[in-house]
Amino acid sequence: MCRRKTTKMKRSWQEATQDDSDLGEEDIEDWSSVASSILVSPSSKNTPQQAAFSREHPPLESDHSRTIVHIDLDCFYAQVEMIRNPQLRAQPLGIQQKNIVVTCNYVAREFGVTKLMYIADAKKKCPNLVLVSGEDLSHYRDYSEKVTDLLQSEFSSLVERLGFDENFVDVTSLVEKTVPGDQSLVEVKGHTFGPEGQVACICGCHKRMAIASHIASRMRARLREAIGITGCAGIAWNKLLAKLVGEKNKPNDQTTLLPGSEQKLMLSLGHARRIPGIGHSMNKKLESAGIVTIADLQRASYSDLEAVVGSQSATSMKNSSFGIDNTAVTRSGPPQSMSDEDSFKLCASLNDAKERMYNLLNSLLESCRLLDSLPEAEGIYAMLMIRKRWRTPLTIRLTIRKHSSAKKWLRESRQTQIPVSATEQIKKGIFTVHGPLMEVLLVLFKKMVDVEQSFHLTLINVCLTNFQAKSTFSKSLDKYFSKAKNIENERKSESEQGAADICKKTTDDSTNNPKVLTNQQDSNITQLFEKQGRRPLQTASKVLENKQNKLSFFTRKLPSDVKTTSKSDPHQGDGELSQGERDKTATLSRTRYSVEVKNDKPIDKPEGDISSETGPSFAKSDEVEKDFLVVTSSREQTSEEMSSSSHQSLEIPGNVDVTVFKSLPLDMQADLLREWKVQSTRDMAPEIKTSSALSSQPSTSNRRITDFFTRSKETR
DNA sequence: CTGGGGTCCT
DNA sequence: AGGACCC
């Protein structure tokens, strides 16, 4: 079977090889039939035999079983600045970092301003260009996280970030749940890429793409409603194609790839460098072998290619050139590192370097803390934020760039463990550890720079990484709730105490001073500076603009997400929980969105609408801000689920204040319910088997907080 | 006249 | 620790 399949693939490859310029229907049809004939379980690709076989014949398998949406925000930094200051919307706006316009709005683009353009050139093109500094990324980071969170909580738990402004969303399971029973024809929403009316594949992918196009439309609508941000979507059956097709209609639009048109899409790109994964150095290697275009790549013999770039790259490039990509959407989780950097013309003295390092470190620790907003949040919010945010880095890295004539862009770095004294402090929520960290940074600095000699630096970067694996906060949760009434009554200091309690781990002394959580100047820091005028710790109090968004932070990668050497199971979908855990999952969830497809036309309907029984049920978007708990109704409920949703108070541990609990955002309530439920049933006997439809019901946001604390970064 | 971030692999 | 890649 594999052999037949591969033979057929090979034939199509040879056809493409023989005349790349001919994009006739024959090629496309052949590809389509190939694609449809080999809907095969991709899990069969990891066997050694397969790998060995692949070396001779790269695994060109077109897999249509997944449905991927790629979301790409329009000129992201510029959009954020326009949200922050709407007056900018009407003007040509450029975001400036040092000497460069890193991005600009579409008004400016009409003047010919482009990304990564020198300020001087941009001003020449557009003398009235308004420039906003974009060197501080924190606002962009905030909006970026909101976007990922929205996609993750409302559409799919499988969301992968790429930079700040792109997200891949695997909507396979959502699509499957909404496949209409009788309607075979579903119109694609938005633009398509490919010939109209093409019926290319018999596997049902066309219909899935069409449904996904409605989901993508809903995603973009939600991003606009809830965050005020616009973006493009690409819809296809793998990440590569989704990303590439999404660019076809910009800005603020969407494009669905029609099955059979992948060859046309890939060849439309022209240059091989347009393929994600082929960067500067790969491209140079390819050029040295005479491979410049994607057609060249398709045409190149595998053995030649392998000789130039190695077998692994050869295989993935060959596949990519045909639009084949089996890589999974990998849930991003919270960041693996936090860094802050500054570049400059000249840094030539130790004191200068110290001050710059201090400033970088200070802003890093500031963004770790989030305690500034604590007094303005309810105690419970603060605590949960802390639970999410307080990840303790175990290593610190210093990176510099020396001016040394030749390789100006070369960086050097040294890293070391953060002193245990400092990590202990951070665990307790005390972020005034500048002193010890500065000492460590200084050591790292001197490993790279001979401070006795003259030096010339042009960049310094401080990076916190290697976050601690296991959180100890989880067990303090119930304690917190039992104190919740105090917090309500006594406001600020009490909320700080609440946070402090959480941080005390378990057996801490009872004399813990609540004030540890306020800003404290570390007097030791003074000794690090011979010169005065350094900045005190900033006590800026950021307000919680949006508690929901602040609180729904990224989930952490789970062990099952950790890469298995190469291929992925496209059906792992929402499956990072074990079957048993899923079955125990509370069914309360926030309103979810989807699209009802009826008579070839999508109709928005509230999820509770019983008349939607015949088709897939989707919530309507207008009511999203009303946070009411709904029992997801896109399938039948088991009696167990009915009871868990209608008698939710039974799921709440006795020591928890119900009033406080009910004041929480609904998705958080669901998170906690699930957490308790899982905990209370963890040691029970194996549960009743349920249907796959049931088990695949996503618990969306339910996973976020719990996973964050029960699982953490596994050491690598 | 080259951003300020991130990721993973070797 | 560096290098590749991404935005």
Image (cartoon, coloured by chain):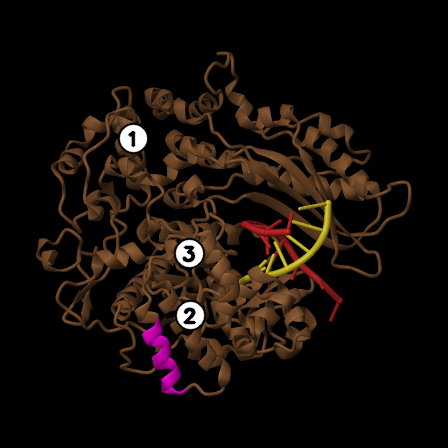
Chain colours: A brown, B red, C yellow
Chain letter of mark 2 equals: A
Q: Within 10 Å of the Cα at label 1, are there few (<14), some (14-19), or many (20+) other Cα atoms?
A: many
Image coordinates for residue A45, horizontal then vertical, percent:
42, 56
Q: Secondary structure at mark 2?
A: helix
Of tags 3 and 1, which is closer to the observer? 3
Q: Secondary structure at mark 3?
A: helix
**Which mark is first along the chain, 2 or 1?**
2
Q: Within 10 Å of the Cα at label 3, are there few (<14), some (14-19), or many (20+) other Cα atoms?
A: some
Magenta span covers which residues? Answer: A24-34
- Provide the residue designation for mark 1: A678
* Left/right of residue A3 with respect to residue A685 in the rendered view: right
Chain letter of mark 1 equals: A
Q: Residue at x 48, y 43 (%)?
A: A334
- Provide the residue designation for mark 3: A45
Of tags 1 and 2, which is closer to the observer? 1
Q: Residue at x 52, y 69 (%)?
A: A318
